[in-house]
Image (tube, helix red, strand yellow):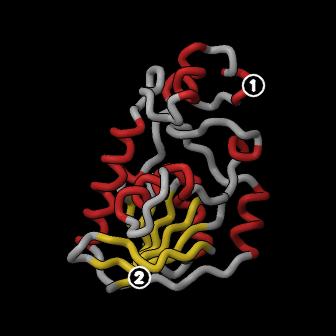
Amino acid sequence: MRTIIFIRHGKTQGNIERRYIGRTDQPLAPEGINVIKSKAYPAADAVISSPMKRCTETAGIIYPDNSILIYDDLRECDFGNFEYKKHEELKNDPNYIRWIASAGREELSGGESTASCQKRCCEAFLKAVSENAGTLAFVVHGGTIMSVLSKFADEKREFYLWHCENGCGYICDLDEKKQKLLNIRAF
């Protein structure tokens, strides 16, 4: 067994404005930096991050003495035509209505399907686990965390029920032989 830590990046301006931000490469907002700096996080032997600024900045604040290992496929879902828009801007768009009604299972208009995003994130997670030893901290996106936990957690929950707020996350144990995440605790 080894310890795995999942941390959702700090808030960006897009998060504050409640926009869909996937491929938009935003830095942390001052509020996001302050929240990250105000919390204590578990120690890690290796820090793994999405390539997006909001993740690498969060990782650098939390783990200033660790090298940050970038895994491109841990990035957030590409929201396509919904990217950087708010619900209010999309609520009359038939494609958006269909996507919401499907609980995100319908393919995104001009973007990445949820299934494709989940597959990509889960494969990147397994690759990072196989290439790094000790306690691993994954500083990633909400969608990435939900993808990995909905696939590998021993506690079965729907995808969106693994949601966590910016700067928060989960700590758990990994049974590598069974590829299962156990004893999952939110923080």
Question: How far from the left and from the top, in percent, is residue 23?
Answer: 50, 38
Q: Please, what is the three-letter code of the amino acid marked with disc 1?
A: Glu
Mark 2 or mark 1: name the one nearer the start of the chain: 2
- Is the residue marked by circle 2 packed among few (<14), some (14-19), or many (20+) residues within 10 Å? some
For image coordinates 44% across by 67% down, the residue present is 155
x 63%, y 31%: residue: 84
Nearer to us in this view, 29 or 39: 39
Quarter residue 1 falls in: bottom left
**Label 1: how many Cα within 10 Å (few below 14, some 14–19, many 20+):** few
Where is residue 179, by image quadrant?
bottom left
The one nearer the camera, 87 or 53, is 87
Identity of the residue furthest to the left in this view: 177
User: Could you tell whether 117 is left or right of 92 in the image?
Assistant: left
Q: Quadrant of the C terminus?
A: bottom right
Q: CA distance from mark 2 to mark 1?
A: 40 Å
Q: Secondary structure at mark 1?
A: helix
Q: Quadrant of residue 180?
A: bottom left
Judge whether 51 appears above or below 20 on screen: below
Q: Amino acid at mark 2?
A: Thr
How many marks overall?
Answer: 2
- Residue in the image at 66% along x and 28% along y: 85
Which residue is located at x 36 percent, y 57 percent? 151
From where the camera sits, is residue 68 visible? no
Q: Please report contact status of discs 2 and 1: CB closer than 8 Å, yes or no.
A: no
Question: Which residue bears the numbered disc 2?
Answer: 3
Q: Is residue 47 above or below residue 79?
A: below
Q: Position of residue 87 (x, y in %)?
A: 70, 29
Which residue lies under the disc numbered 1?
88
